[in-house]
Image: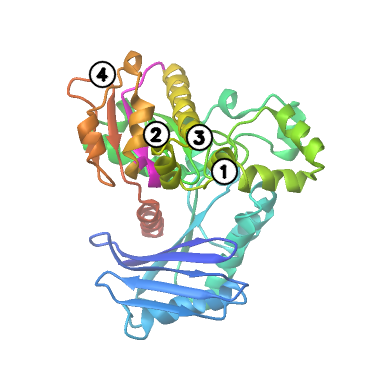
Amino acid sequence: MLILVVNAGSSSLKYQLINMEDESVLAKGNCDRIGIDGHVSHKTADGRTVDADCDFPTHTEAFEKLVEVLTTGDAAVIRSMDEISAVGHRIVQGAEVFDRPCMVTPEVIDKIDELRELAPVHNHAHALALRACTAVIPATTPQVVVFDTAFHQTMPPKAYMFGLPYEDYEKLHVRKYGFHGTSHRFVSAALAEAMGRDIKDLKIVSCHLGNGSSITAVQGGKCMDTSMGFTPLDGILMGTRTGAVDPSAVTFVADKHGFTPDEMSQYMNKKSGFLGISGISSDNREITAAAAEGNKRAILASEMLAYQIQKFIGAYTAAMNGVDAVLFTGGIGENSWEVRERVCKNMEFFGIEIDEELNRSTRGKLMKISKPGAKTEVWIVPTNEELLIARDTLALISEK
C-alpha cells in the first residue's frame, strides 16, 4: 500500500511517497516558489533525481508537476496515481475543532480555511493545497488531514489558558494551542519502545529543537503542557523568533520603532531569535562556530538557548511530579552535541548526567546518551513526522 504524504506551505509543497508494507520512502521532493517562478526537486530511493525550474502560478500546477515526476520520466516510481491508496496532509492549526485526524471533505477544507486567523502563514496554504490535490488526484483516492495541534488538546485548562479576560477565550479563541504535536507524539512513542517501557508509565520532557523549537511535557503518552502558545512564536529562543517576551516590552519596542501590529509581528518572527541576538545568522551551526571562536553575542545566544531549555525541563518536571527521560529531536536536537551538552550540564539535581564522549560522537540516530545508572535517561530520538502522518492515514482509511 502506497501513501503520499503532503506538507504544504504558502509557497511550497513538500511530499514523500511511502510504501506502508515496510515503511520505506520510495521518493520525496519539494515543489517550491509557488506563485513566484517555480522549482521542483525530486529524488527517488535509488538516487534518481529531477531538478528543474517550472511555472507554478498556484498550488494546482505544483500538484500537477508532483504527479508528473512520480509517474513519468527517468525518476518515476509508479505508473499512475491509481497506485496510491491515500494522501495524508499535515495541517498546522486545528484549534479546538480538530482533536484527531479526519477524512477530507469540502466542509473540512472550509473549516481549515476558516482557522486561518490563528495560523495566517499556514492554514490558508493548507486549504489551497487540499483543493488543488482534490482537483488533480483520482476522485476515488481518500485524503486524510493530520493536525499539529491535536496532540496538545489533552492539556488541562490551567495549562492552556492565558491571564486575559475569559471572554477573549470564549469569543476570540485565544489560548495556548502548541505546535510540533506530530513530532512530539512520534518521538515520545519511539522513546517508550526504545526503553522497553509502556508509555502510560512514563514522564517525558520532549525537546524538539530546530529553526523552530518547542518543549513538551508528555505524561502517560499525553501532552500536559508545551512551550509554544497561541502561535509558534512563544516559548524558547529560536532561529528568527523571540520566544517568550514580556508583553509590555513588545508594546514599548513597537511604540519606539513606530511599528504597526503586523510590522511588530514580523520583527519578532523574522528578525529576532538567534539572528537578532548574534547579529550573525539564524542557523545554530553558524552560531556554534562563532561562539567557539569567541564571538560574545554568539556565546550569549547559545547560553540563552540552553538556559531556557533547562528552565522548561525544571518546570515540566515539577508539573509532572517527576521525569523519567529527556529526549532531544529535530535538526538541532539530533545533530548538535554542543546544545545537548550545555542543556544537560549542572542538572544533576534532576538526575540528568550524560556521557559526554558518547554525546559528542552521536548524530542523527536513536541513542541513549545518559550515564549508566543515571536516574533520568537522556536520549536522542530522530523524528519522522511524515511516517506518523502516513500511519495515521492508513489507520483511518482502514476503518472505512
Residue 384: give x, y in percent of width and height. Answer: 35, 51
Local packing at callout 3 (Cα closer than 10 Å; few below 14, some 14-19, many 20+) is: many
Q: Going from the N terminus, do you reach mark 2 or mark 1 first?
A: 2
Q: Amino acid at mark 2?
A: Ser
Residue 310: give x, y in percent of width and height. Answer: 43, 24
- Which is more foreground, mark 3 or mark 1? 1
Residue 89: give x, y in percent of width and height. Answer: 48, 59
Judging depth in this view, the residue of 108 and 331 nearest the camera is 331
- Mark carried by residue 301: 3
- Which is more foreground, mark 4 or mark 1? 1
Q: Secondary structure at mark 2?
A: strand
**Quadrant holding the C terminus:** bottom left
Q: Amino acid at mark 4?
A: Lys
Is residue 115 at least partly visible in the picture? Answer: yes
Judging depth in this view, the residue of 36 and 357 nearest the camera is 357
Whether the residues at callouts 4 and 2 have beta carbons within 8 Å, the answer is no
Is residue 368 at least partly visible in the picture? Answer: no
Q: Secondary structure at mark 1?
A: loop
Q: For marks 4 and 1, give the CA distance.
A: 39 Å
Direction from residue 377 to residue 170 in the image, left or right = right
Q: Residue at x 53, y 43 (%)?
A: 149
Q: Residue at x 47, y 44 (%)?
A: 180
Note whether 322 is above or below 379 in the view shown. above
Q: Going from the N terminus, do you reach mark 2 or mark 3 first?
A: 2
Residue indicated by mark 1:
279
Extent of the magenta region = 321-333
Judging depth in this view, the residue of 63 and 288 nearest the camera is 288
Q: For marks 2 and 3, give the CA distance.
A: 21 Å
Q: Secondary structure at mark 4?
A: loop
Local packing at callout 4 (Cα closer than 10 Å; few below 14, some 14-19, many 20+) is: some
Residue indicated by mark 4:
375
Q: Amino acid at mark 3?
A: Ala
